[in-house]
Image (cartoon, grey):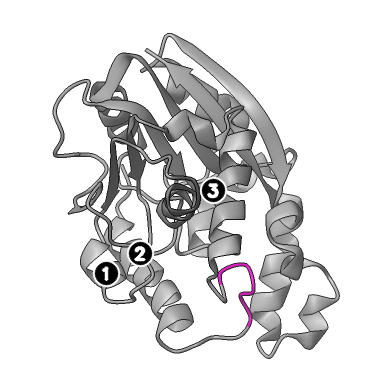
Amino acid sequence: MATNWRKAQENEAQFWRSIYVENRKDVPTYMPITDDAALEFSKKTLERFGHGLDTIVGRVVIDVGCGPYGLIRGFQVHATKTGEKPERLYGVDPLMDTYLKFGTLPVEPYIEYVKAKAESIPLADGSCDLVLSTNVIDHVEDPDSVLKECQRVCRSDGEVCFAVHVVNFPFTLLRPILFLIDKNHPHHFNERFLLRMARRQFRDVAIAQKVTILEDHPEFKFMSVFSSKEKIRGLKRWLSTFLLSTRYLRCRK
């Protein structure tokens, strides 16, 4: 359990506020938000889990730790363009009050936003066909409890798909102290630990895809250090491309 979770949440809220309120310029991955970018992000994420956008049609879907952008906007764009929408789409996040002020999350009758910690999702057992969570498990207070909750709200024939950064070998020995540098993430996992944690809650666990940091954040490349106004931040970003990569996991009860 993370002792620094509340501080990490404050850092997380400030990170997004700096983008969507203070108009920070060095995060092209998140700005500007367009329908095409949102749709591409959601489509790409589902494909990394081995799914397509048709997976969400007519189903109850939850995005755990949805953040201010997340998968929801892309799903809404797809539904508007095609008429193929989920039966119900939930966005759950403890910082929901902050995110709703940004105006970045869409409003539709089939979408419901819930302010709640991922350790205590206020939905009934087996109420969701598909549970999604991207870049969240390492932000929470108690990762085991979060996976247990994801398993609980997922139907017996449903699926839990989550993506998370892992520390690459040979940097795994640094895991216990990385929170001192990366203050938005209370936890840092390696692949073995992550799989062991998932298998405590799920019968079937598989890595659907492994992705480098640069694939999602090309602005973290080395030359960006020189163009960045904050050289230390730019250097930390570049170093993270060696230190971390992302795992996309598919889990069944």
Q: Secondary structure at mark 1?
A: helix
Q: Which mark is residue 113?
A: none
Give the number of the disc on residue 100. Answer: 1
The circle on residue 105 is: 2
Closer to the chain start, of discs 1 and 2, is: 1
Vertical position of residue 28 compared to residue 218: above or below: below
The residue positioned 57% from the left and 29% from the top of the image is: 51
**Magenta stretch in the rendered image:** 26-30
Q: Residue at x 38, y 64 (%)?
A: 68
Q: Determine whether label 1 and label 3 are within 8 Å by CB.
A: no
**Residue 207: x %, y % from top left:** 61, 24
Callout 1 amino acid? Leu
Q: Position of residue 189 (x, y in %)?
A: 54, 39
Neighbourhood count class around disc 1 (C-alpha, 10 Å): few under 14, some 14–19, many 20 upward: some
* Callout 1 touching callout 2 (CB < 8 Å): yes
**What type is the residue that disc 3 sits on?**
Ser
Q: Is residue 66 above or below residue 145?
A: below
Residue 219 occupies quadrant: bottom right
> Is 79 part of what is drawn in magenta?
no
Crowd around label 2: few <14 · some 14–19 · many ≥20 (10 Å): many
Q: Quadrant of residue 206?
A: top right
Q: Is residue 186 left or right of residue 100?
A: right
**Amino acid on which disc 2 is placed:** Leu
Q: Secondary structure at mark 2?
A: loop
Mark 2 to mark 3: distance in Å? 14 Å
Vertical position of residue 28 compared to residue 141: above or below: below
